[in-house]
Image (spheres, rainbow, N blue to C red):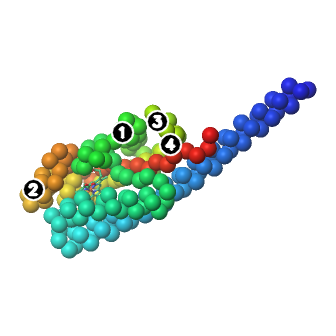
Amino acid sequence: MRILIVLFSLLCLANMSVHAQTLEQQRFEKDAQAAIKALADDMKKALMTAMQDGGPVEAVSVCKLIAPTLADEVSRKFALDIGRTSLKVRNPASEADSWETDVLQRFETRLASGEAIQKLSFSEKVATDEGPDQWRLMKAIPTDKVCLSCHGSKIAPPVQAMLDEHYPNDMATGFKLGDIRGAFTVKRDVREK
Ligand code: HEC
């Protein structure tokens, strides 16, 4: 009988921690999705304004200046860390780590096997070398028509010159409409033990 009670308590404890973890993960995923939407909207607005004001040449420096600032603001607002990455980055600071590379490769496979690009998202708890585990989430960013003037195959010479100047190791060209340009990547330290 005593053994049964001990077993039962253990089961309850295990169950509670699974449940708590799920709630924390749910909260993370909800915040991450909201942060992604906020950042995507902010960046679209900034990009459109810059393109209308000065065309793609001007917009290159706007992207360079404000993309990190917007990401910082959104990170603070949602108490997480949001950025963008890709298998082919323009800014070397945005290069994918091994977890991100893995997820991006799986997005490519999922897209190739017919899944809608808007559905490509993935999240899990990831252990880190040092420090606490992290919740991580990625969501694919589709290549739209407006992206092609700076990430496509036919880039106007003045735009190309600007890109060469700011990003000598640029790998983020040659994308086609509907390709995965990259992904939003979000993380937050896990609090539950
Ligand atoms: C006016 C040129 C321009 C246009 C148009 C443009 N981008 Fe970019 N993109 C850039 C620049 C410049 C960077 C590097 C920003 C930085 O320094 O962090 C960049 C970086 C990125 C990154 C981060 C990863 C990396 O390669 O460094 C993603 C993802 C991205 N762009 C997606 C898009 C998408 C999607 C669109 C269309 C909706 C788009 N871009 C349109 C210029 C542009």
* Image quadrant in which the N terminus is located: top right
Residue 86 in which image quadrant: top left
Label 2 secondary element: helix
Classify mark 4: helix, strand or loop: strand
Q: List x then y, in percent, for residue 136.
A: 48, 45
Amino acid type of the residue that numbered disc 3 sits on in the rendered structure: Glu
Q: Between disc 1 and disc 2, whose residue precedes?
A: 1
Mark 3 vs mark 4, foreground winner is 3
Residue tagged 4: 134
Q: Residues within 10 Å of mark 2 (few under 14, many from 20)?
A: few
Identify the amino acid type marked 4.
Answer: Gln
Please state which of the two labelled residues, at mark 1 or mark 3, is closer to the viewer: 3
- Ligand 1 is within 8 Å of the C-beta of the residue at disc 3: no
The one nearer the camera, 12 or 171, is: 12
Percent across and percent down for residue 50 are 23, 70
User: Is residue 97 toward the left or the right of residue 1 in the image?
Assistant: left
**Residue 106 visible:** no
Residue at 33 percent across and 69 percent down: it is 45
What distance separates the C-alpha of mark 2 from that of mark 4?
40 Å
Is 10 placed left or right of 97 in the picture?
A: right
**Mark nearer the viewer, 2 or 4:** 4
Q: Which mark is residue 130?
A: 3
